[in-house]
Image (cartoon, rainbow, N blue to C red):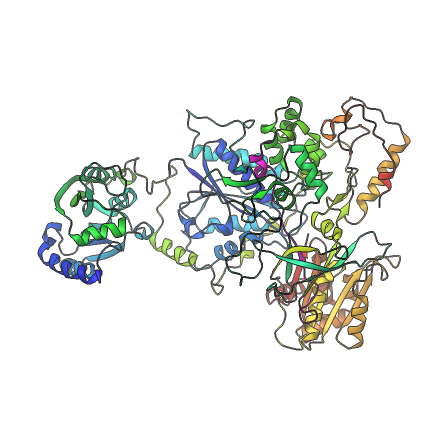
Amino acid sequence: MAEDVRGASVGHQVCSAAGMADFGISAGQFVAVIWDKSCPAEALKDLVDKLQALTGDEGHVSVENINQLLQSAHKESSFDIVLSGVIPGSSIVHSAEILAEVARILRPGGCLFLKEPVETAVVNNSKVRTASKLCSALTLSGLVEVKELQRESLSPEEMQSVQEHLGYHSDSLLSVQITGKKPNFEVGSSSQLKLSIAKKSSPSGKPAVDPAAAKLWTLSANDMEDDSVELIDSDDLLDPEDLKKPDPASLRAASCGEGKKRTACRNCTCGLAEELEKEKSRGQMSSQPKSACGNCYLGDAFRCASCPYLGMPAFKPGEKVLLSDSNLNDA
Amino acid sequence: MPTPRLLVLFGSQTGTAQDVSERLGREARRRRLGCLVQALDSYPVVNLINEPLVIFVCATTGQGDPPDNMKNFWRFIFRKNLPSTSLCQMDFAVLGLGDSSYAKFNFVAKKLHRRLLQLGGSALLPMCLGDDQHELGPDAAIDPWLHDLWKKVLDLHPVPLDLGIIPTGIPLPSKFTLQFLEEAPVTHSEEQHVARTDPQDPPSELHPFLAPMVSNQRVTGPLHFQDVRLIEFDITGSGLSFTAGDVVLIQPKNIAPHVQQFCQLLGLDPDQCFTLQPREPGVPCPVQLPQPCSVRRLVSQYLDITSVPRRSFFELLACLSPHKLEREKLLEFSSAQGQEELCEYCSRPRRTVLEVLCDFPHTAGAIPPDYLLDLVPLIRPRAFSIASSLLAHPSRLQILVAVVQYQTRLKEHRRGLCSSWLASLDPEQGPVRVPLWVRPGSLTFPETPDTPVIMVGPGTGVAPFRATVQERVAQGQTRNFLFFGCRQRDQDFYWEPEWKELEKRGCLTLVTAFSREQEQKVYVQHRLRELGPLVWELLDHQGAYFYLAGNAKYLPVDVSEALMSIFQEEGGLSSPDAAAYLARLQRTLRFQTETWA
């Protein structure tokens, strides 16, 4: 029902607002129209049709949902005009990332026309900006000649749209139309000021992701479950070098000490560990070991290598601890 | 983003790769870099094209395979349709963990590194190949590599001059905080589990089934060195379903004396309850932990206090130690120079977290409870091949468990946590319930009936084949050939009467190898070669499927060698052709292995 209401008022408004000439669109131009779910579908279609009539066959009209804009990763400097939020009834708030992206995809000298609800009262909130903050935002994104074109009050339907889509209500809102231009010199990555947050080029100067490649990757990644996708044979990535075993000498710790002893595996379950233990304890039983350092009671971490208490838990100094043989004969 | 961010993605089977990743995360934070550490399969791979700096930490497991928590990623990254410029934004590095005694040493890391290059990524430095075979373990390769890595990363993102690096002696904030409750909550119950969102879901790690144990019998003879148990569970009403080759996961607990000792050392009241809160938003709490939880439950069911601590444990403990002598020692054990000492003290004798804390009592007593989950890893479930078929034993699940027990130079025997716990449970003394769930196995069986199946399963490796034979016989498939090896027919010939019965009915051909009944060792691979003509006939002329289950290190190599000799002798193939024949069998799933470390 709301759509019908909107459709009726929008139909009226498109005819009266016209404003196509104000956008300065001519044949052969590349235009991008940015929309979101607050835009009435009929009006969007209407606008696109009118734009296409103006750009003709040589030009092109791209329609972009604001949430897809960054992922679409258009080639930089590929649009003459970008229109956003201009459809009557929409209530788009343009984030810094979006503005920076628009600045990137505009060609030098290209223009942005945007419409956004703004707050006229002094209110501490982040959802709707003041007109001057909005103009600053465009400047920060790298656009020049930023100016306010017109401001008008919101229709009841537009107020409702703001409530619905932005979750914000105020009696002091206005709808403001602003324009900005990409500077006429190509400065590459520095057309975005350091303060902008989106899509900084990395210090190592990496190329931008080719939008076609990004699309393919995204499509594939959104279909992880698909088992029928062909895989390359990962074994093809290997070469004979990969099968070579490391030199055993390289596997020893820096200080080796005695020659290689027969050691049991960490999780020996074959009995070798027990056999080795028995051998060792037989050797120890013959001599009466004495403490060399006096730290015996502290635990293995502090005992010296010849400590007779190695392997036993810490105990209280002076406590009588028997080095019994019974432990050694456990199965 | 205010701070540059490092993404560390890992594939970890036993927790080592995860531990290394968390170490990377801490070192990043000490250098004032934001860092996100995540398992590969938990990361939304669609975002990878936008990531500027990624470190991949990947273990290689089994037969050159990726760990479970990166299997989905592995299937994705090799898709033919991924464009070669996809990762042009990415600087990456690959750290691999493996064991050079296996032929496919660090194959996952090697393949990943090359694939990332193929997809347009730039390598910051050559890959690191951590090796379990090194005396000092993977750290021998990791330490110098990390040194180089940080040099490269700090070139890109230097530490802000006004901040500087956080030195290693100072602890980083704990991941979680524990809020202790004044009184025990009214509904507190030891059996309380996280409520299931949908009771129709089959049991899982988050909601295991508490299976009543029906019987727990030793099946090795009294003279045999190892205690092996046949354990049966009642799974009525569990919603669990499985077929031959599937695997049951069991979540073990610590025994009460260990729990008590730990609480005493740390000055914790086992009956106190707490809630757990992450310090940073977006960090998940361990999903299995109920809230609120008691200290006793935390220590007995979640903290792996009988695990062997890694270097990171000593690093953190050093930061928290108030005692001069102990702190010095702990710092030594955390340093690069002290790694040999640490190996001697801890890794080689398999000293546990609990035993280490006993050696450092002043530090143990000063551990803030907030740091418990940073310090002690979570108990991991253990997997066992299911040894019974629902077609032969409906509503029942059987497993064959070898109790792990061995000696190092520590006087107290080393024991496997899960196998010892299971062995200690006696259903005849009273009701016993064990948390478990099932996951599919990797073995697939032939669809055409009358296809012969050859199974080689020495020792406890025979468990999945016992299930297989039961299932096939119930379905009327009688062409079953089992090669079973053990030490002595009267000591560890599992299921001997059952096999004999099936032989009499013509459902099974059994070939045994008793390794210690004669002067020389006789193993299953010898028997395979003795029966070369039969094996060749079955494989080459009758489309037989060949299966292998058991120890990962030697069995696959030994059996593959035996098969290739058979192909040469019986089939007249040349040596390279024999290898190609075996490779073809593998590709068409007619040669399959289920092996464990």
Measuring from the top left, give residue A303's x and y in whole percent.
Answer: 75, 27
Relative to B526, does residue B339 appear above or below in the rendering?
above
Q: Which quadrant, please, contains the N terminus of chain B?
A: top left
Residue sitting at x 37%, y 54%: A213
Measuring from the top left, give residue B258's x and y in whole percent.
Answer: 70, 40
Residue in front for this viewpoint, A7 or A177: A7
Position of residue B553 in the picture relative to residue B485 (left or right): left
Residue in front for this viewpoint, B94 or A162: A162
Position of residue A237 in the picture relative to residue A211 (left or right): right
Relative to A113, does residue B585 appear above or below in the rendering?
below
Residue in front for this viewpoint, A146 or B208: B208
* Residue B493 can be seen, yes or no: yes
Position of residue B301 in the picture relative to residue B221 (left or right): left
**Which range is magenta?**
B368-395
Residue sitting at x 22%, y 63%: A1
Q: Where on the picture, by quarter, is residue A18?
A: bottom left
